[in-house]
Image (tube, rainbow, N blue to C red):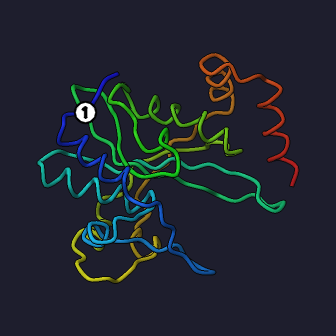
Amino acid sequence: MTKFPKEIENIYTFLENCKYENISDEKYIYYKSPSQIDKTKSCVCFDGAIYAYSKLQELEYKPQIFTIKGIRKENGKLINVAHSLCIIKINGKYGGIGKSGSKQMQYKEPIYSDLKQLAMSFTKDLFQRNIWAQSYFIEDETNFPLLLNETTDKLYTQNQICKSNNTIPNFLEIKEITQYLNQIWNISQTQINELLTDLRNR
């Protein structure tokens, strides 16, 4: 197992011990600043990624926020879903830490040569949640100061944080995901076809 330096592992351990708490209402999911997370010991994936980002910046690393998007069917309708992770390069390899309801989604060893390899590593865990991965990108860092510098108890929506549309997504081909799930994880073509058919039949 390839691990991060201890100081990065310590940040991950803090996030792992935080409660996965989704603060939402009928319209929005709300996010906490790093200072709020320190106080409440709770977060979700996006603000957990921001927390790791802020702590790694303090340690003079050069982190980025990586987001992978997909679709799933809920109550007969297709909905967009996303997961964010704070990523960093160690010895030329990408890895990441953050927060999720799944350990496989919140920690990625620094073993990936490029962002596409990292994105593909999420496809199995998403598939097991009936989510088909579609694209990935690096979040625009100009959106983050609102959260990073916040010391009050104010909560923010993602629309308030991510105001720019400078990110260009990298799309994942159905064929390459299928091949990856077949060859790496031994997921049968029948299982894959069942999910894809369900997503296409709205």
Q: Residue at x 16, y 45 (%)?
A: 61
Q: Residue at x 52, y 51 (%)?
A: 101
Secondary structure type for disc 1: loop
Answer above or below: position of 54 versus 187. below
Q: What residue does disc 1 label?
A: 4
Residue situated in front as seen by the camera: 56 or 158: 56
Give the image location of residue 9, x and y in percent: 25, 40
Give the image location of residue 66, x and y in percent: 40, 47
- Drawn side of residue 96 relative to residue 195, left or right: left
Residue situated in front as seen by the camera: 165 or 79: 79
Give the image location of residue 73, x and y in percent: 76, 54
- Drawn side of residue 153 relative to residue 156, left or right: left
Quarter occupied by residue 141 = bottom left
Task: Quarter of the image for the C terminus: give it.
Answer: bottom right
Task: Quarter of the image for the N terminus: give it.
Answer: top left
The residue at the far top in this view is: 183
Quarter occupied by residue 166 = bottom left
Residue situated in front as seen by the camera: 185 or 175: 185
The residue at the far right in this view is: 201
- Drawn side of residue 59 relative to residue 63, left or right: left
Q: Residue at x 65, y 25 (%)?
A: 181
Q: Residue at x 39, y 65 (%)?
A: 42
Residue situated in front as seen by the camera: 161 or 30: 30
Q: Residues within 10 Å of mark 1 (few under 14, many from 20)?
A: some
Dot 1 amino acid type: Phe
Count how many numbered circles sit on residues in the image. Answer: 1
Quarter occupied by residue 175 = top right
